[in-house]
Amino acid sequence: MKIIEWARKVQAIAQNGLFFSKDTYDIERYEQLQQLTASVLSAKLTIPEDETRELWCHEKGYATPKVDVRGAVFVEGKILLVRERADGKWTMPGGWADINDTPSEAVVREIYEESGFTTKAIKLAALYDRNRHPHPPMIYHVYKLFFICDLVSGSAKHSHETDGVQFFSPEGLPELSTSRVTETQILRLFEHNQNREWPTEFD
């Protein structure tokens, strides 16, 4: 959906302009640009304009991609997946990185919160630009960090975000939450787990 890519770029220009500009005239124009972006998205995607304005209303400062971390935990040739309450589909445990977390701390925390397992991040297998992979369109520009993690301890537990925790073979993957992870990405992580000396993939 090219309209989302264009809107994301125009919004970033406006947000960066508001961050750097001191001139009242320029500030008003950048705010108008944000409003125009919301109006165009509303018209093209048939979403109420107050909802499109809300998408970026809390974004301040210099515009940068968001960071999503995902942990690949393997036991006996199977990968750990969790079922999201939001859509009833499965994904690798993970989510947005929090402020003051290192990437490895963020993924270990997410795995524990969503599955009940304590792990150790061993390898950054891939750093992907979400836009270059077949995920459903998303308003934000996102970098996805995929870690190979070793299981340390714990037992399967549900969370307020997940209601299923299970290990799956590559041949028996369940219906995936493709906004979070794709089958191709999971299968590639199986390969990285078998070849931990491989370098990190990117883009």
Image (cartoon, helix red, strand yellow):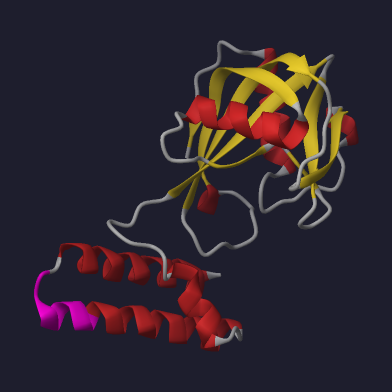
What span is colored magenta in the figure?
Answer: 22-29
Residue 3 relative to residue 9: left or right: right
Residue in view at x 22 percent, y 63 percent: 19
Left or right of 48? Residue 179 is right
Q: Is residue 196 above or below residue 164?
A: above
Q: Main secondary structure of the magenta part?
A: helix
The residue lying toward the viewer, choosing from 26 and 7, is 26
Q: Quadrant of residue 123?
A: top right
Taking 26 as reference, is 133 left or right? right
In x, y percent, where is residue 146? 58, 32
Q: Position of residue 135 (x, y in %)?
A: 64, 54
Residue sticking out furthest to the left: 23
Q: Is residue 196 left or right of residue 102?
A: right
Most extreme residue toward the right, as rendered? 172
Seen at 54% across and 49% down, the residue is 130
- Residue 71 location (% of width, % of height): 64, 30
| 26, above or below 181, in the image | below
